[in-house]
Image (cartoon, helix red, strand yellow):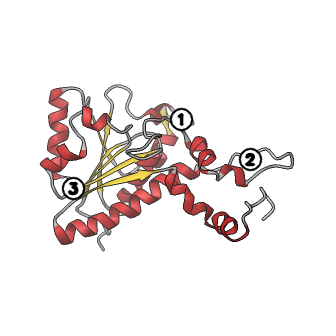
Amino acid sequence: MNAPLDGLIILDLTHVLAGPYASMTLADLGARVIKVERPGSGDDTRAFPPFKDSESAYFATINHGKESIALDLKNAQDLQIAQELIATADGLIEGFRPGVMDRLGLGYGSVRALNPSIIYCSITGYGQSGPESQKAGHDLNYIAEAGLLGLGADKDGAPVIPPGLIADIGGGAYPAVMNILMALRQAEATGEGTHLDISMSDNLFPWMFWAFAQHQVTGTNPKPGAE
């Protein structure tokens, strides 16, 4: 029996967690995922412990089932190779700060000119536009600024850091996968691709639906650890 995404090609231009987790999920569903890494060092997580036989188990956990190619996207020859891969791909996932892909010549407009049906997915902390778009951040920044961190506190009232990476996986990877699958279905029907703007911080608000409901009805916010 064929896997659901057999025959599809996804280019993964992401690193660390949210993007690689999304592309890993697509690989698990049968897609051929080609991971583009920096020459020499590769994905940052290749240097993350724990190690087995000098290989990062962290990296292997969220990058299994993928192919890997080392390309310097600032090099003209390597950029041409990337463009050739793009021309035959069904999807592309990137996690650069807004504007970086445009400067590399691989923004959505340039990619769409090469492949009008491609699904182009950008995963960032704060989205492609707006006052926070150029701001760097990590999982803890996103859950704090969205208000999610403040809903949990210890006996002294200090926020408790969650044991899981909610923004990266729940706000980035999973929404990316869901939207990529829907966009692929649309592209099959229409031949037209699209640009998906996945904001990890924005996608945290559904995690707090009950807190919003309480505030709307009672005018008060939930008390940390009490509701």
Percent of width and height locating residue 3: 32, 68
122 versus 36 height, above or below: below
Q: Secondary structure at mark 1?
A: strand
State the residue position of label 3.
Answer: 118
Q: Secondary structure at mark 2?
A: loop
Q: Are marks 1 and 2 in contact (CB under 8 Å)?
A: no
In this picture, residue 6 sits left or right of residue 76: right
- Residue 117 sits in quarter: bottom left
Q: CA distance from mark 2 to mark 3?
A: 41 Å
Mark toward the start of the polypeptide (1 vs 2):
1
Mark toward the start of the polypeptide (3 vs 1):
1
Mark toward the start of the polypeptide (2 vs 3):
3
Which residue is situated farthest in the bottom direction here? Answer: 1
- Front position among marks 3 and 1: 3
Position of the N terminus, as image quadrant, is: bottom left
In this picture, residue 52 sits left or right of residue 191: right
Q: Secondary structure at mark 3?
A: loop
Q: Is residue 40 visible?
A: yes
Position of the C terminus, as image quadrant, is: bottom right
The amino acid sitting under disc 2 is Val
Say which residue appears at 40% left-offset and 64% top-offset. 178
Q: CA distance from mark 1 to mark 2?
A: 29 Å
The amino acid sitting under disc 1 is Phe
The amino acid sitting under disc 3 is Ile
81 versus 62 height, above or below: above
Percent of width and height locating residue 92: 28, 50
177 versus 66 height, above or below: below
Q: CA distance from mark 3 to mark 1?
A: 36 Å
In the picture, the disc for residue 51 is 1
Percent of width and height locating residue 124: 43, 44
State the residue position of label 2.
Answer: 160
In this picture, residue 123 sits left or right of residue 142: left
